[in-house]
Amino acid sequence: MASTATTPSRGPYIAVITNRNTNLGIRGFMLFSIGVFLALVLNLLQVQRNVTLFPPDVISSIFSSAWWVPPCCGTASAMIGLLYPCIDSRLGEPHKFKREWSSVMRCVAVFVGINHASAKVDFANNVQLSLTLAALSIGLWWTFDRSRSGFGLGVVIALLATLSTQLLVYNGVFQYTSPDFLYIRSWLPCIFFAGVITMGNIGRQLALYECKRMSGKTHQD
């Protein structure tokens, strides 16, 4: 009698791993790495345009970024990317809107574009810039997310991140050129909101493969 062997499905790394804790660790590491990379690239844009200024003694990388910025952004990215699918599960509202990697990549591209606009595009005044970035950020949420939980988490985390940035600037860790809202730039919450939505979508997409694998394993058993 011929025996049949089950061949692991090929594809993303997480599809062939069945341990939930291992999956969680891998997803966290992937999200951390993506956050670090985006922080280096986006902070480079801000420094080149003199939007943010770091003291000379804390600039220690080839990307002209303070050493603590990428790890902090990576940690926040991992927390956000793991939190979004967890909240979806708790609320019993699985996110099904545009669940494919091509959509996630477009979301990342739009987020980089929004950040690029804040550093490169010259507007008549800060109010016009802030309103434009706010519209673009909400448009990013509507185009790639559209969930109430995503919007709510985006607003809350953006406000907390803005408050943390204000505390750092107040204590002299770094500074913004031409601050117009309590030591910072008024458009900063819009950037944080867009970043939260982006990392949330990446986290949801990574979690999707774990759910598919667990569901398939359950049916086989």
Image (cartoon, helix red, strand yellow):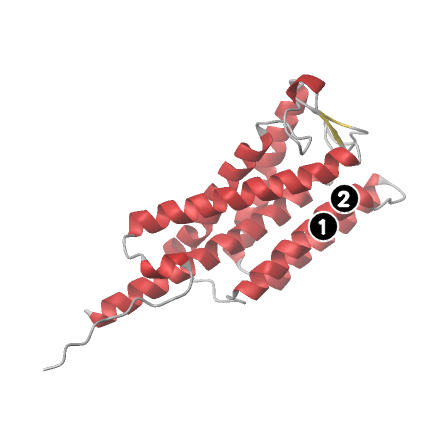
Residue drawn at x 42%, y 49% is 27
Whole-percent x and y of residue 76? 51, 39
* SS under mark 1: helix
**Which quadrant: the C terminus?**
bottom left
Residue at x-position 57% and y-position 47%: 196
Q: Residue at x 58, y 52 (%)?
A: 198
Disc count in the image? Answer: 2
Disc 2 residue type (three-letter): Ser
Q: Check disc 1: other Cα within 10 Å, few if <14, some if 14-19, many if 20+.
A: many
| Residue 120 in view in this figure | yes
Q: Are marks 1 and 2 in contact (CB under 8 Å)?
A: yes
Q: Which residue is mark 2?
A: 118
User: Does residue 19 sit above or below 172 in this rendering?
Assistant: below
The residue lying furthest to the bottom in this view is 1
Q: Residue 111: give x, y in percent of width and height.
A: 66, 51
Q: What is the residue that sits farthest to the front in this orientation?
A: 2
Which residue is under mark 1? 114
Q: Badge 2: how crowded within 10 Å, few (<14), some, or many (20+)?
A: many
Q: Is residue 27 left or right of residue 187?
A: left
Give the residue drawn at x 44%, y 56%. Answer: 206
**For the N terminus, which image quadrant?**
bottom left
For the residues labelled 1 and 2, the Cα–Cα distance comes to 6 Å
Q: Nearer the viewer, residue 195 or 134?
A: 195
Left or right: where 191 falls relative to 221: right
Q: Amino acid at mark 1?
A: Ile
Residue 186 visible from this viewpoint: no
